[in-house]
């Protein structure tokens, strides 16, 4: 879709923004995103955002467990079996390493998944709609697109202000 | 790669021959390489030298001596019998003037690296002593003189010969006496040679010198039998042995021989239940005392009285006349009864150099009819021929100016004579002083000329330790330095142009060859002599000389006075090995102290005097020594070891300990170790001793299992209950029993035979390149020796029972050490050995922490090429003693006993190349090889007929700390004491 | 409408979101470091340099420079290793347990606690390395393909588990820590005026935006990583405990060790947190963030844990007596309680089980100075515990002939002090250049009402 710029509704209270979001949704205005200095769980639900990271993490853990066992078994039973203290080479104590390395692979890959999905990398240049959302402001972003005429824009503006936006800014593309 | 065809039959034969000669290229006990030329005769020595060429080259290069380089012959064509990488063994003889031992010398690439016992000798019988083992290191000692010395500066033989000859002539003409002072000489050929030398220079007077002679015994025997001899003893025939201050298992006369005999009489293998009994009356806790069944503490001054009391008791019971005797509280009735039960099968000896006492001993032995049974006067022992009187005469002679010159051979009186001060003063006046010492020792550095003698491993010689038993010394390496054998000197100065080897050979051809009739060809005879190293001429049976009673008397025991009992310890002896780091670091089997001598005092005395371990005391107001509290030391006596406090031994030995020769009791003209009384005062100082064992008792843990003969006969497993319990209740595991298919190497140690002589410790050190770490490190508990001889006391009270237990790696099948190594540096071989990959070890020391026996050693420093540890491994010459078959461990690596892996491998390969099964007893690990009491057995546990399996197959077998279920391959046999209860 | 109080305020002196940002970022944005900071930095680096001498001495000369011997082959190095690992547990214990348990009061402490974890683990990690003397061989531990067979490692060696566990622990807690800091880096990035700082924190912030979807993924990832790392708190020290428990040394070979060690670790960790936070809140005037309620809570926890410690000690001794094994009996009754190591033993008992009981009294809990002192005592006590375990057991094992004592040398002490210097230096740098409290989380808990909504929703 062709970007016409954005409408930024700036709030300074997380609870106020809740009601604003409700209102906007009731007037079925599509909210593009909400920028906040800390997570607003209830906003996610209203915008019903979902993530599949947990499933990924489970796979990583499983991989860690099985991979470790495979490696241990191959090295100390198949590839070069040595006798240590008269114990069998395929030992129950593999469990310890399987457990630890499962966690390792789980954590590391989850982290990677997070930054990949979120397209974060060191030195990425962040385009904030409104830098203050890193400090004490909460910003609702609404796309302006073609079929949105002045009236619509004004309506949104009013909605926002009515619902406690301290200011509403327009950014034209 | 083009194919090879043989063009002609000759070449074909050639090829075959080569392949054959490769077959025989196998290590074996022989002087292989000598024989051919030997049998051809005359040119033996030159051939021998040729054979040595290569190694000499190597040695020459490292030892910065003036030897012309052209003598270093590279092996263009391999000398016969010299296969690089394969050891050669040469039968030879060790005699340092005090101790005799018949040995095999193991050489690699023609350099001697190890001494082993020679089982053909029925005197030392494959046994050696720690000193014998360590003697190989003296060959590579940096302090050895590199050539003749004149007035303290390097010289050459030509000038030396000229000048000494000249001076001898002069002294001959204005007939001044010239003293030739030698150690006891047991070599018939050398004696003959000296005789000829004396003929050539009639003004020469030959004096034999011993720092600790046994003249009293000779005198006593002269009185009683008209023969001034030291008799040969047969401890193996004695059911009851009584020792009076005679440490015959440790240092007295022929310890190796006596240990062997002693253990023979006490072996309990193959169902044998007869065992001799040893009573020991002594002042210090000696090695013999620690092995005694009954041990009594006596003061030196009580010895005669106790002996007389014993004599009287026996006399009473046998209806002989009783002699008036001073009273002593020591109870001898049980002993007397035992002795009478064992008439003719008993033996009483005393090590005290006091005629009174020796007469008493003879009288008692005569009462018991031991002569001809356990004591053989007809085969005299030729050791210890020195007489104090001769030395005294010499000194007077010098002072009176009657003597004009003196030669010292293999003696160091300026250090170890009682009259050292007189002697030193006297020597100043002499115009001609010559020493044949190999190093600049105390005596040599007072001499005008030093003509360094060869090391015995570089010399030819023969020996007659006891009458009719001959033994041969042959060089195993060409003289490393520009040295010359003593005998060669005499020959040169007599103007005889003949090498001593030829002289020796000629002497045997003319004087000994005719005496035998087995050989018709002398060369064959001579070859056999050298191949076997020993030769025995059976003396014809003759009755013992008749006994003429001597005067029996005993002085009153001194009351109150503090009496000294000096002693020689296992390692230092009289002090001639002070510069040998191996011996300096050998823990004393009783005190476990290294690198020092000290004053041993009894716990009671310590309490009375308020003395603590390591407090320094002043003796007679000058000599300062630390005290060591020694259970078993007689109250109000002290013991001090001789042989320390050398001032010119070398960088290792100088200033180690204190010299106490001054304390020898010379009141009646005889050097008596016992009897002088001293004043002892406490000082505020303390001095730290390097002990290897801090805790002395077993805390009631089943470590050394012991029982008494009686209960053993009733029940073979008596004393071994812990093992029985283990088999019944504790012998199970989560894991299946480890299985081995071909071999499972096992070692068994008979605690009943082990006397704790510590010979195995040095043997192992020599075999496995174990580093010397020095006093400070020993104090910090970092001694590296792979064998540790644990010594426990039954309790820390006075006169405790003593246990000796050698502990090396037990090669556990469930080894705790292996489980914990993170990098898999430790693993179990399929022959049941616990292996270490040194180059894989990263030094977490987890294995040390987890080894219940603490037999693993960590290289805390780089012990090689490190000036902090300036011992043999820091010197290019000293390193020649290293065994090329064993890795030298680097810093940060854990090491331990490998059960002589290299020896196992060598024999396995041999068997393989000869395409046969490995014979039982073919592999002799280093500790077992030289054990004088055969306490150690090594072999295959899977072979039920093997020696070790049969040894283990008794009720006495147990493993150390069995309840841990580490399943060690090393087993112990219960110690059995022959006590009433 | 929104002013329904459901719980006491977590952050006092009614601050706004902006105040939080200002307070937390001001030390980072200020041009010069405060004097106390410079002084302590100087001291810390001095300690560090001495420690480096210790390292040099060990590596260049050899392990002989330590007081160890062929009987007591483990000493200070292992003691300190375990001690540091113990301290390292606080961070994870705090942030992760409390995160998983939605204990929101943790927010003002967890960041610092995690930082502590990181530096403590690093400090601990130095010891196993230097303990080998030839650290250049350390890589043998990794099962890399090699030409020696290839010989892999002995994967049943507790020491190998140890290496893996510690490595995992370090990685996991670092990532968790870092992820938590990303939004705060972003706010610093947006706040700072200096070009360089903007660049640096820009790089560190990975270009974080704080969009709703971003926060969702952020929260999920953080929760998952936290949840995964939580078991490590248990496993890491259990495995360290197995180093001992898997050995057969009397006094080590005991099934109680893993839980016993974990508890001990958390004990020392909390104590260390207490020590540090008391200092930090003083010098940074953060009393409003780290309130007395926090300290009080930690103190209560410590009291509880010290009781668990007491139980462990007692049961250890009981089992020794019950086993009736002469070796065990000797270690606990002769060697520790009454023998050569009685002082260390009783020091341990006093510091770990008796002194913390003072926390029963409200007065003492309220008295910050006393709390501080007691926390120090606990740290000392825990050090003694490790000393008792490692040294007393090894110095008198199975064969009395091998008994030998152990005294640390100056080199070992230098290394220990050095790691302390390293730790302090790390904390100082953290305080100076990193957001020492999670701003986003603080803001999250600023308004009580934001919880109300959560609650109502969770009720539906």
Image: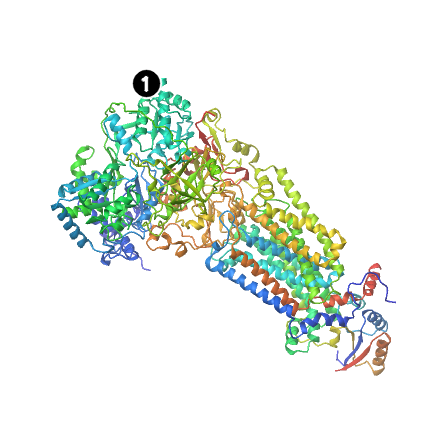
| Residue C209 picture location, percent across and down | 71, 72
Relative to C106, is B381 on the left or the right? left
Most foreground residue, C188 or A62? C188
Mark 1 residue crowding within 10 angstroms, few (<14) / some (14–19) / many (20+) = few
Relative to A102, is B588 on the left or the right? left
* Residue wearing tag 1: B321
Most foreground residue, A151 or B515? B515
Indicate the colouring scheme. Answer: rainbow
| Residue C371 picture location, percent across and down | 70, 56
Q: Is residue B130 visible?
A: yes
Q: Secondary structure at mark 1?
A: loop
Give me the residue at 19% from left, 33% from top: B516
Q: Is residue B788 visible?
A: no
List the single residue furthest toward the right: C1
Relative to B318, is C396 on the left or the right? right
Quadrant in the picture for residue A37? bottom right
* Tag count: 1
| Residue C419 picture location, percent across and down | 57, 60
The N terminus of chain B sits in image quarter: bottom left
């Amino acid at each position: 879709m062709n970007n016409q710029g954005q409408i930024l509704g700036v709030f300074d209270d997380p609870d106020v923004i809740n009601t604003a979001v409700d209102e906007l949704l009731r007037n079925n205005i599509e909210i593009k995103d909400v920028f906040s200095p800390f997570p607003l769980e209830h906003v996610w639900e209203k915008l019903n955002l979902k993530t599949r990271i947990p499933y990924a993490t489970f796979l990583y853990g499983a991989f860690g467990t099985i991979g470790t066992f495979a490696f241990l078994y191959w090295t100390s039973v198949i590839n070069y079996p040595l006798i240590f203290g008269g114990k069998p080479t395929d030992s129950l104590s593999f469990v310890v390493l399987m457990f630890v390395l499962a966690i390792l692979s789980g954590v590391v890959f989850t982290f990677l998944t997070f930054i990949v999905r979120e397209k974060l990398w060191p030195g990425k240049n962040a385009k904030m709609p409104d830098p203050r959302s890193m400090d004490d402001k909460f910003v609702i972003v609404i796309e302006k697109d073609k079929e949105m005429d002045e009236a619509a824009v004004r309506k949104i503006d009013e909605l926002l202000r009515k619902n406690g936006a301290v200011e509403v800014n327009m950014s034209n593309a | 790669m083009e194919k090879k065809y043989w063009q002609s039959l000759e070449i074909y034969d050639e090829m075959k021959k080569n392949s054959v000669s490769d077959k025989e290229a196998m290590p074996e006990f022989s002087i292989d390489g000598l024989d051919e030329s030997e049998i051809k005769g005359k040119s033996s020595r030159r051939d021998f030298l040729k054979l040595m060429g290569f190694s000499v080259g190597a040695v020459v290069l490292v030892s910065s001596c003036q030897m012309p380089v052209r003598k270093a012959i590279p092996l263009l064509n391999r000398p016969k019998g010299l296969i690089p990488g394969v050891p050669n063994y040469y039968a030879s003889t060790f005699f340092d003037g005090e101790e005799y031992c018949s040995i095999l010398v193991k050489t690699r690439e023609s350099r001697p690296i190890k001494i082993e016992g020679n089982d053909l000798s029925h005197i030392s019988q494959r046994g050696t002593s720690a000193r014998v083992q360590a003697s190989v290191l003296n060959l590579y000692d940096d302090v050895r003189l590199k050539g003749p010395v004149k007035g303290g500066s390097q010289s050459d033989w030509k000038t030396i010969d000229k000048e000494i000859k000249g001076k001898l002539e002069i002294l001959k003409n204005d007939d001044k006496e010239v003293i030739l002072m030698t150690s006891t000489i047991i070599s018939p050929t050398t004696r003959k040679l000296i005789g000829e030398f004396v003929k050539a220079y009639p003004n020469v007077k030959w004096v034999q010198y011993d720092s600790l002679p046994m003249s009293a015994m000779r005198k006593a025997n002269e009185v009683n039998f008209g023969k001034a001899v030291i008799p040969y003893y047969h401890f193996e025939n004695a059911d009851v042995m009584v020792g009076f201050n005679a440490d015959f298992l440790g240092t007295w006369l022929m310890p190796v021989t006596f240990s062997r005999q002693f253990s023979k009489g006490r072996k309990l293998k193959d169902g044998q239940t007869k065992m001799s009994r040893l009573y020991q009356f002594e002042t210090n806790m000696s090695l013999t005392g620690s092995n005694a069944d009954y041990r009594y503490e006596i003061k030196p001054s009580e010895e005669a009285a106790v002996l007389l009391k014993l004599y009287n008791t026996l006399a009473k019971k046998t209806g002989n006349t009783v002699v008036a005797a001073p009273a002593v509280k020591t109870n001898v009735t049980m002993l007397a009864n035992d002795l009478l039960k064992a008439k003719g099968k008993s033996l009483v000896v005393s090590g005290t150099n006091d005629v009174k006492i020796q007469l008493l001993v003879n009288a008692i032995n005569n009462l018991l009819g031991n002569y001809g049974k356990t004591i053989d006067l007809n085969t005299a022992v030729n050791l210890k021929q020195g007489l104090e009187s001769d030395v005294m005469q010499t000194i007077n002679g010098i002072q009176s100016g009657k003597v004009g010159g003196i030669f010292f051979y293999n003696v160091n009186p300026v250090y170890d004579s009682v009259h050292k001060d007189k002697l030193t003063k006297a020597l100043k006046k002499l115009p001609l002083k010559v020493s044949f010492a190999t190093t600049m020792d105390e005596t040599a550095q007072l001499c005008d000329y030093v003509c360094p003698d060869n090391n015995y491993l570089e010399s030819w010689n023969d020996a007659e330790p006891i009458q009719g038993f001959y033994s041969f010394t042959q060089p195993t390496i060409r003289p490393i330095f520009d040295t010359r054998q003593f005998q060669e000197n005499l020959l040169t100065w007599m103007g005889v142009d003949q090498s001593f080897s030829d002289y020796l050979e000629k002497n045997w051809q003319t004087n000994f060859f005719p005496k035998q009739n087995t050989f018709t060809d002398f060369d064959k005879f001579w070859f056999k002599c050298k191949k076997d190293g020993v030769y025995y001429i059976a003396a014809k049976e003759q009755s013992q000389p008749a006994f003429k009673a001597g005067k029996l008397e005993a002085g009153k025991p001194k009351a109150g006075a503090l009496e000294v009992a000096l002693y020689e310890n296992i390692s230092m002896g009289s002090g001639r090995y002070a510069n040998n780091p191996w011996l300096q670091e050998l823990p004393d089997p009783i005190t476990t102290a290294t690198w020092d001598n000290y004053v041993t005092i009894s716990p009671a005395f310590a309490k009375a005097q308020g003395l603590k371990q390591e407090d320094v005391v002043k003796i007679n107001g000058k000599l300062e020594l630390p005290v060591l509290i020694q259970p078993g030391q007689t109250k109000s006596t002290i013991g001090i070891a001789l042989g320390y406090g050398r001032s010119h031994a070398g960088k290792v030995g100088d200033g180690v300990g204190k010299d106490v020769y001054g304390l020898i009791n010379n009141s009646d003209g005889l050097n008596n170790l016992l009897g002088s009384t001293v004043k002892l005062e406490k000082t505020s100082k303390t001095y730290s001793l390097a002990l290897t064992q801090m805790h002395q008792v077993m805390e009631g843990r089943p470590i050394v299992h012991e029982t008494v003969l009686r209960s053993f006969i009733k029940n073979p497993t008596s004393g071994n209950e812990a093992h029985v319990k283990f088999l019944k209740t504790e012998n199970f595991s989560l894991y299946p029993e480890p299985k081995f298919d071909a071999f499972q190497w096992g070692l068994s140690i008979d605690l009943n035979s082990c006397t704790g002589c510590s010979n195995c410790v040095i043997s192992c050190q020599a075999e496995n390149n174990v580093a010397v770490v020095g006093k400070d490190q020993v104090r910090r508990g970092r001694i590296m020796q792979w064998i540790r001889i644990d010594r426990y006391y039954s309790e820390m009270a006075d006169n405790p029972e003593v246990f000796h237990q050698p502990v090396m790696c037990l090669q556990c099948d469930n080894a705790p050490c292996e489980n914990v190594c993170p990098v898999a540096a430790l693993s179990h071989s399929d022959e049941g050995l616990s292996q270490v990959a040194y180059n894989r070890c990263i030094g977490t020391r987890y294995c040390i922490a987890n080894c219940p026996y603490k037999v693993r050693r960590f290289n805390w420093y780089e012990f090689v090429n490190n000036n902090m540890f300036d011992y043999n491994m820091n010197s290019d010459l000293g390193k020649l003693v290293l065994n090329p078959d064993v890795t030298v461990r680097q810093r940060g690596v854990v090491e331990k006993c490998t059960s002589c892996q290299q020896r196992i491998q060598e024999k396995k390969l041999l068997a393989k190349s000869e395409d046969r099964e490995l014979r039982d007893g073919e592999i002799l690990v280093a500790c077992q090889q030289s054990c004088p009491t055969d306490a150690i057995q090594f072999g295959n546990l899977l072979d039920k007929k093997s020696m070790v399996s049969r040894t283990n197959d008794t009720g006495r077998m147990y493993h150390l700390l069995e309840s841990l279920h580490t399943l060690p391959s090393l087993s112990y046999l219960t110690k059995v004491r022959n006590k009433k209860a | 409408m929104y002013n329904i109080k459901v719980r006491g305020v977590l952050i006092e002196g009614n601050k706004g979101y902006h105040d939080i940002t200002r307070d937390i970022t001001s030390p980072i944005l200020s041009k010069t470091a405060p004097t106390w900071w410079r002084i302590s930095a100087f001291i810390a680096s001095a300690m560090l340099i001495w420690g480096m001498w210790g390292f040099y001495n060990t590596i260049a000369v050899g392990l002989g420079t330590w007081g160890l011997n062929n009987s007591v082959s483990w000493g200070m190095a292992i003691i300190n290793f375990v001690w540091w690992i113990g301290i390292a547990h606080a961070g994870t214990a705090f942030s992760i347990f409390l995160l998983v348990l939605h204990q929101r009061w943790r927010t003002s402490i967890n960041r610092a606690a995690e930082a502590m974890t990181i530096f403590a683990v690093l400090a601990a990690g130095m010891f196993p390395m230097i303990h080998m003397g030839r650290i250049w061989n350390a890589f043998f531990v990794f099962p890399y393909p090699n030409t020696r067979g290839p010989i892999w490692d002995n994967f049943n060696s507790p020491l190998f588990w140890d290496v893996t566990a510690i490595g995992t622990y370090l990685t996991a807690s670092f990532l968790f820590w870092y992820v938590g800091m990303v939004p705060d880096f972003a706010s610093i990035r947006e706040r700072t005026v200096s070009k360089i700082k903007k660049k640096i924190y820009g790089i560190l912030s990975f270009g974080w935006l704080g969009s709703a979807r971003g926060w969702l993924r952020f929260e999920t990832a953080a929760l998952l990583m936290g949840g995964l790392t939580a078991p490590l708190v248990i496993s890491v020290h259990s495995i360290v405990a197995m180093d001992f428990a898997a050995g057969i040394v009397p006094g080590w070979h005991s099934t109680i060790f893993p839980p016993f060690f974990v508890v001990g670790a958390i004990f020392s960790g909390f104590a260390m947190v207490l020590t540090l936070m008391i200092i930090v809140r003083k010098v940074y005037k953060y009393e409003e963030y780290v309130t007395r309620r926090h300290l009080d809570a930690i103190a209560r926890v410590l009291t509880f844990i010290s009781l668990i410690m007491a139980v462990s000690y007692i049961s250890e001794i009981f089992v020794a007596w019950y086993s009736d094994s002469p070796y065990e009996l000797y270690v606990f009754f002769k060697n520790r309680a009454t023998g050569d190591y009685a002082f260390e033993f009783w020091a341990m008992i006093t510091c770990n089980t008796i002194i913390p009981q003072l926390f029963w009294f409200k007065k003492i809990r309220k008295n910050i100075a006393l709390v501080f002192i007691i926390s120090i005592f606990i740290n000392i006590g825990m050090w003694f515990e490790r000393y008792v375990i490692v040294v007393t057991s090894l110095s008198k094992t199975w064969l009395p002939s091998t008994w030998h004592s152990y005294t640390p040398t100056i080199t070992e002490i230098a290394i220990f002090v050095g790691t302390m210097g390293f730790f302090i230096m790390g904390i100082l740098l953290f305080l100076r250049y990193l957001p020492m409290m999670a701003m986003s989380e603080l803001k999250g808990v600023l308004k009580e009402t934001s919880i109300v909504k959560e609650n109502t929703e969770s009720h539906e």
